[in-house]
């Protein structure tokens, strides 16, 4: 009788261990799939061509979406926009 109980306990522990390992493997695959999807999504944006504009103050070119516009003029930063206001 004690031997049968011991066998049942060992089988239950083996089943719980296997279930835990399988769950960890599934979660690892899901995390890898999410990371791969995010990596691909980020990579797609690199293929876009971004228009560049020239800073009126220093002449450096910056992507248009990062530039600061003021009265139709483009600047590389708020500081250069403000400096151009003081000069002009």
Image: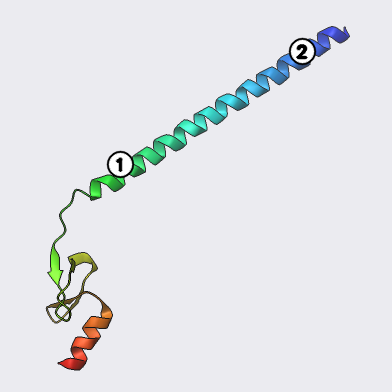
The CA distance from mark 2 to mark 1 is: 48 Å
Residue 56 falls in image quadrant:
bottom left
Left or right: residue 54 versus residue 27 is left
Element type where label 1 sits in the image: helix
Q: Give the residue pinned by disc 2.
A: 8
Residue 84 percent across, percent down from the top left:
18, 87
Mark 1 crowdedness (10 Å alpha carbons): few <14, some 14-19, many ≥20:
few
Which residue is more in the foreground, 59 or 73? 59
Q: What element carries label 2?
A: helix
In the image, residue 28 above or below residue 11 = below
Q: What is the basis of the colouring in this image?
A: rainbow
> Disc number at residue 62?
none
| Residue 61 location, quadrant | bottom left
Image-quadrant location for residue 38: top left
Residue at the (14%, 82%) spot, across then down: 71
Instruction: Return the x and y of residue 31 as percentages of the image width and height.
Output: 46, 37
Q: In this view, does 17 lie to the left or right of 79?
A: right
Viewer-closest of 88 and 3: 88
Quadrant containing the N terminus in the rendered view: top right
Front: mark 2 or 1: 1
Which of the image's four quarters has the C terminus? bottom left
- Residue 23, percent from left and from top: 56, 28
Looking at the image, residue 33 lies above or below residue 83 = above
Vertical placement of 65 versus 31: above or below? below
Mark found first going from the N terminus, 2 or 1: 2
Instruction: Read off the residue under disc 1.
Output: 40
Of all residues, the one furthest to the right in this rendering is 2
| Picture coordinates of residue 67, whole percent (x, y) | 21, 71
């Amino acid at each position: 009788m004690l031997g049968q109980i011991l066998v049942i306990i060992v089988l239950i522990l083996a089943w719980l261990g296997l279930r835990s390992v399988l769950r960890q493997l599934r979660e690892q695959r899901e995390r890898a799939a999410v990371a791969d999807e995010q990596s691909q999504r980020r990579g797609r944006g690199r293929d876009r061509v971004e228009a560049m504009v020239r800073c009126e103050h220093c002449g450096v070119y910056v992507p248009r979406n990062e530039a600061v516009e003021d009265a139709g003029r483009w600047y590389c930063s708020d500081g250069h926009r403000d400096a151009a206001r003081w000069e002009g």
